Image: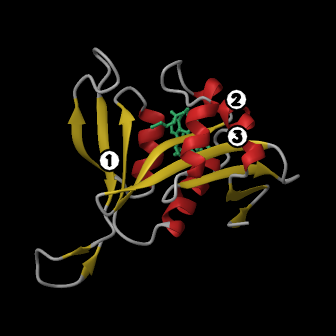
Amino acid sequence: MAGDVGSFQIAPARLRDLRAVARIQRLAFRPGLAYGMSALLVLWSAPHSTFLVARDDSGEAVIGCVIADRHQGNARIMNIATHPEHRRRGVGRALLRAVERKNRIGDVVLMAEEWNTGAQALYESEGFTRTGFARDYYGRGRHGIWMRKQRRPNTDTGARIYV
Ligand SMILES: CC(C)(COP(=O)(O)OP(=O)(O)OC[C@H]1O[C@@H](n2cnc3c(N)ncnc32)[C@H](O)[C@@H]1OP(=O)(O)O)[C@@H](O)C(=O)NCCC(=O)NCCS
């Protein structure tokens, strides 16, 4: 178990969790963005991926998930979702922090849909800033916002400053 936060727990996803994760995907994302079982299986077995779930206090029911991989020396969050009945209880924040703990090297990067200001508020409160705009990334008229949490030393000043 990676850690306990209040009345839920964050832990690596088990193979038997994937069906529940697929259900959360369908509840959280529109068709086309939700990962199905076969994609989840590939992501779960990828060697450098971080695939975590939040479980309720019984330790069984999956109430959230996060999937990240390594990209250009950074951790890249590919997907994060909390079951609709368990939102605004700190699950998303705990999942983000668990990805950071598991990926100590490099920055953390992700993309949010432009309209998704709730998710962006979460990321900003965790220290992410906007770094780019990807026009039509999610389809025509559906733009993406790149966000990054900088954790590398800032070498521009010559000093080892961690931001
Ligand atoms: C985005 C998401 C993962 C957040 O999960 P969550 O478990 O509800 O998040 P948390 O409870 O940890 O939220 C922490 C803080 O983030 C901010 N926040 C989260 N959701 C928010 C929303 N809908 N509106 C405004 N602020 C929000 C708030 O500051 C919140 O703190 P508060 O509840 O004390 O005000 C969840 O809403 C979700 O699954 N959405 C659908 C899938 C999705 O959009 N994923 C992100 C793709 S980029």
Give left or right: position of 129 versus 66: left
Given residues 22 and 156, the one toward you in this image is: 22
Q: Amino acid at mark 1?
A: Met
In the picture of the structure, the residue carrying the numbered disc 3 is: 18
What is the x, y in percent for residue 14?
73, 52
Question: Which label sits in the foreground, 2 or 3?
Answer: 3
| Residue 32, x across and y down, in percent | 48, 20
Q: Earlier in the sequence, mark 2 or mark 1?
A: 2
- Say whether marks 2 and 3 touch (CB < 8 Å): no
Residue 124 percent across, percent down from the top left: 39, 50
Question: What residue is disc 2 on?
Answer: 23
- Look at the numbered disc 2 and give the secondary structure of its residue: helix
Q: Which mark is residue 160?
A: none
Inspect the image, locate mark 2, and give the three-letter code of the amino acid beneath it.
Arg
Q: How far apart are the two marked residues, 2 and 3, measured between alpha carbons?
A: 9 Å
**Which residue is disc 1 drawn over?**
147
Tell me the quarter of the image containing the N terminus: bottom right
Residue 119: x %, y % from top left: 47, 39
Tell me: is circle 3 under 8 Å from ligand 1. Answer: no
Q: Amino acid at mark 3?
A: Leu
- When the figure is inspected, residue 138 is found, relative to residue 117, above or below; the finding is above
Q: In the displayed structure, does residue 119 sit left or right of residue 61?
A: left
**Residue at horizontal 39%, vertical 36%?**
112
Q: Nearer the viewer, residue 27 or 70?
A: 70
> Is disc 2's CB within 8 Å of ligand 1?
no
Secondary structure beneath label 3: helix
Q: Residue at x 23, y 84 (%)?
A: 160
**In which quadrant of this rendering is ligand 1 seen?**
top right
Front residue of 63 and 125:
63
